[in-house]
Image (cartoon, grey):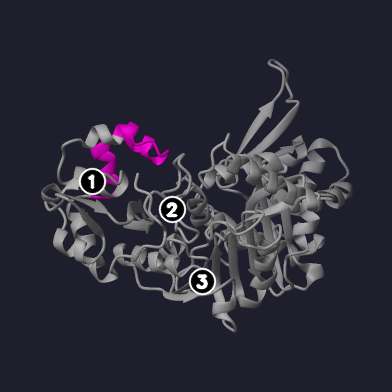
Amino acid sequence: MSTNSGSAALPDPDHCVALRDAFLAADFTVDGVLEALGAPAYAALGRGETVPAERATRGGGGLAALVRLFLLQRPVEREAAAETLPVDDCLAGGWLVAEGGDVRAAVDVRPYGGPDGQDWFVVSDLGCAVGGAAGARGGADVVLGVGGASMTLAGLTVRDKGVRALDLGAGSGIQALHAAAHAASVTATDLNPRALGFTRLTLGLSGAAAADLREGSLFEPVAGESFDLIVSNPPFVISPGRRLTYRDGGMRGDDLCRALVEQAGAYLAEGGYCQLLANWEHGAGDWRERVARWVPDGCDAWVVQREVQDVAEYAELWLRDAGDRPGTPEYAERYDAWLEEFASRGTRGVGFGWITLRKSGAARRDAALTLEEWPHAVEQPLGDEVRAHFARQDFLRGVGDDSLLATKFVMGGDVVQEQVGRPGEEDPEHVVLRRERGMRRAMRADTVGAGFVGACDGSLSAGRILDAIAQLVGEDSAGLREATPRVIREMVAEGFLEPVASAAGRGPSMRAPSRRP
C-alpha cells in the first residue's frame, strides 16, 4: 500500500456530489462490494488482508477498478477508471494522482452502511484504514478511517431527533456522520486541522448535512455552549508522549480522559448525554472508586470496563499500532520508555471501556453511579439500552420501598428462564433469569424470586404478588415484604422488571426493543 505522509493537501470538497453520484452509479457501496468480492474476500479485507480481493478484481473495470483504487490502493489504468469516474475532475480536485498511464487514489475512501440503510463513505489517509496488521503510516497528523472502536461508540450512542450534537475529536468524521442523521445541528472539533478536513469530506461524500467544524483541544472551541449529545472517541492511549495525534493525548497517564469527563458536565444541557471511549490506569485501590471521582456534579454515570491489559500487553498493542516491529532498536527503546512511564506511577494495568454521563441535576449524594466490569458479549446497537438504563435509575431514585411495593410491574420483553439441576430431580438447584438482548445480563433467583417475576403481568402490585406467594409457600408475608424491595430494585436496575407506567407509555421508556412481536 502507498504510504501517505499525512500532510499532503486534501481533495477539493466541491467534487463530493459528483463523486458520490459516480460511486452510487457503479454500486461502490457496502452491498455492492460484498457481492463483487464474495464474503470470504470481503471479510479478509476487513482484517487488512488484500490478496483475496486482489484476485477477485484482476483485470476488471467498473466497480473492480474502484475497489482497486480506493480499497486496495493499487494503480489502475486511466481508461479503466474513466468507466466509472470523471477522471479529469478527480485529478484536478486532488482525489486521484496521475502515474504514467495509470491513476492512483490520493485518499482512502471506504463504503460504510448507515443504520437505516444509508450509503455512506468514510475518507481518511492512505494506508490507514483500521483493522490491518501494517499499523498506522504517515506523520503525526495522520487521520485514520473507521475501525472497531469507532463502530462500538456509534452503536452505544443515544439517538434522539432534533438534538444539538458535539463530536469532540472528530477524526475522519464517523461520529459526526451518524449524528447528522438525527441531530438538528452538529458541531465537530479536533486539535488536528487535517482531521477536520477529512470530516468535511466524509460528510460531503456521504450526502450528509455539513457540520460546524472548529479547531482546538477538548472543550476550548465550544466554550460557553451546551449540547444535548456529546460523543468522543478521544486520543485516550496512555503513552510516554504525543507521537500520533489521533491516539496520544499528550497528557500524563489517563489525565486526558479524566479532564474530558470532569469538564463535560458544564457543556451538557439538562437531560443530555456525554458518551465516550476511555482508558484508565489500574494501580493501588479499586479502579471504580478512582473513576467515580471523575464524574461531575449534577450527572449520573454508567461506566463499563470491557477489558484489562497488563502494562506489557498494552505497550505491545500500541507499538504495533504505530507500525513498530519487534527486534529493532527503536522498538526496544520505545517499549522500555513505555514501561518506565507506567512504573513511575505504579500502574499495573490499563482498563478499556465506555463512559456515559447524563445530566440529571441530581446532587452528588443522590447521583446514580454504576461502574462495572462486563467482558461478556453484548448486542449492538446499545443506544436504546443506555437510555433505558438511566430511565430506570430515575425511577429507582424517586421511589421509596412502600411505593415500590405498591407499583405494578411487567417482566422485561426479552427475559427468559433457565432451570439448572440434576436430571430427574423434581426441583431445580437454582433458576437463572436471562435477558436475551442488550447487555444480555443474567441473574440467579430462588423459587420465590422466579415466581415473583413470572407473576408480574401488570395486573397486581408487587406487594399483592408477594402476599400471594407467601400464602402459597407458607412464609411470613411481612418478612417477604421487608426483604424483597432490595431484590426488586436490582431486577428493575438491570431491566428484568419494568414499572407499568413506563411500559404503558406514561413515563420514560425503560425497555430496549424486543425481537418478539
* Closer to us: 461 or 364: 364
Badge 3 local density, few (<14 within 10 Å), some, or many (20+)? many
Disc 1: which residue: 75
Q: What residue type is labelled 3?
A: Leu
Looking at marks 1 and 3 on the same chain, the residue that comes earlier in the sequence is marked by 1
Disc 3: which residue: 166
Q: Which amino acid does label 1 sit on?
A: Pro
* Residue 120 magenta: no
- Rendered location of residue 71, percent (x, y): 31, 46
- Rendered location of residue 162, percent (x, y): 45, 74
Q: What residue type is labelled 2?
A: Val
Looking at marks 1 and 2 on the same chain, the residue that comes earlier in the sequence is marked by 1
- Rendered location of residue 127, percent (x, y): 39, 48
Which segment did they paint magenta? 28-52
The CA span between labels 3 and 2 is 18 Å
Q: In this view, does 292 lie above or below 37?
A: below
Quarter occupied by residue 455: top right
Q: Identify the secondary structure beneath mark 3.
A: strand
Q: Identify the secondary structure beneath mark 2.
A: loop
Q: Identify the secondary structure beneath mark 1.
A: loop
Q: Do the residues labelled 3 and 2 touch (CB within 8 Å)?
A: no
The CA span between labels 1 and 3 is 38 Å
The CA span between labels 1 and 2 is 23 Å
* Closer to us: 469 or 20: 20
